[in-house]
Image: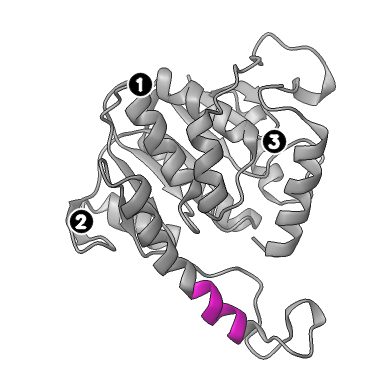
Amino acid sequence: MRSLFRRIRNLARQWSRAPAGAAQTVGGSSSPTVAALPGGWTDYMTWLSFANAGMLERGNVDAFDFVIRNLPGPAPMLEIGSFCGLSTNVITHLKEKYAVKNRLVTCDRWVFEGALPAAGVGGSPFLTHAQYRDFVRGSYIRYIRNIQTFARYDLPYTLEMVSDDFFAAWTQRQTTTDVLGRSVELGGPISFCYIDGNHSYDFVERDFSHVDQFLEPGGFILFDDSRDGSAWEVCQVVAEVKSGGRYDVVAANPNYLFRKK
C-alpha cells in the first residue's frame, strides 16, 4: 500500500470499467483454467460498504464467495492486512451465509509502507507522514468497532503484527492474545489466505512462501491488486506462481485466485 490515494484512484477506475462477476482470461486469451465466477455481492454488502470504510475490489467478493463454497476442509482461513475490516466483515458474512465454521485469523500493524515520518504526504506542506500515521492508527480503533458491529456473531481473531511476525508465531504454534484480549492458538494447516499486506515484492514473496508451507492441497490464495497490467510488485510473485506448476489459476477477476494442486 505504497500510496493509499493511488489505491483509491485505481479502484475507482476499475469499478467504472469492469462489472462484478466478469472474470478475465489469463494473458488476454481463453484458458480452461479460468472460471467465470458468479457474482457474490449481496444487498447486505451494499449496506455494509456504506458504513464500513475500506478498499475492496468487487471481483474479490466473487472470489471470496467461490472459495468459501469450495473450501477443502475445516482448517482456518487467513487474511494478511485488515485495515478497517471491510473484507474481514464480508468474509464473515459469507461464512454465515454458507454455514461455514472455519476460523478466520487476520493480522495487521496498521502501517503503510513507504512513509517517511518527516516528509509531506504527496508533497503536502501541511500534512506529514507522522501525522498521517497517527490518523491511520485510528483505523485500528475503527477496525475493532466494525468487527464488533458487523461480525459480533462470529468474531475473527486479529493479531496486531506484520505478516513476518505473524507467520513466525504460526510456525512456532504460539498461543497469543488478539486485539480483543482473547487467547488464540496459532499453527497448523490453512484452507485459504487473502494476501493484502505490504505489496512490495520481497514482502509478498515471503507471504506466499509462508502460506504455501501451510496451505492444504485444494486450498486457495487470493492476491489483492494483482490484475494484469497492475504496477504493483505483487504481480511479479503472481507470475512466478503461475509458472511454478504447483497451483491452478481459478480466476483473474480481475485479481488472481489460485488453488493448490
Point out residue 30 in the picture as x, y percentages from the top left corner. Answer: 78, 12
**Helix, strand or loop at disc 1?**
loop
Residue 212 visible? The answer is no
Q: Tell me the residue that label 1 is attached to.
A: 98
Q: Quadrant of residue 199?
A: bottom right
**Helix, strand or loop at disc 2?**
loop
* Residue drawn at x 60%, y 21% as measured from the top left: 39
Residue 252 visible? The answer is yes
Disc 1 to disc 3: CB gap under 8 Å: no
Decide: few, some or many residues near mark 3? Use Cα within 10 Å; few <14, some 14-19, many ≥20. Answer: few
- Compare marks 1 and 3 and give the one earlier in the sequence: 1
Amino acid type assigned to the residue bearing label 1 in the image: Tyr
**Helix, strand or loop at disc 3?**
helix
Q: Magenta stretch: dominant SS? A: helix
Point out residue 193 in the picture as x, y percentages from the top left corner. Answer: 45, 39
The label nearer to you, 2 versus 1, is 1
- Compare marks 2 and 1 and give the one earlier in the sequence: 1
Q: What stretch of residues is rendered in magenta?
A: 131-137
Q: Nearer the viewer, residue 6 or 249?
A: 6
Q: Tell me the residue that label 2 is attached to.
A: 174
Q: Is residue 119 left or right of residue 110?
A: right
Disc number for residue 184: none
Amino acid type assigned to the residue bearing label 3 in the image: Ala
Q: Nearer the viewer, residue 51 or 204?
A: 51
Disc number for residue 239: 3
* Residue drawn at x 75%, y 39% as measured from the top left: 15
* Residue drawn at x 24%, y 62% as measured from the top left: 180
Structural distance between the alpha carbons of marks 3 and 2: 33 Å
Point out residue 120 in the picture as x, y percentages from the top left corner. Answer: 74, 85
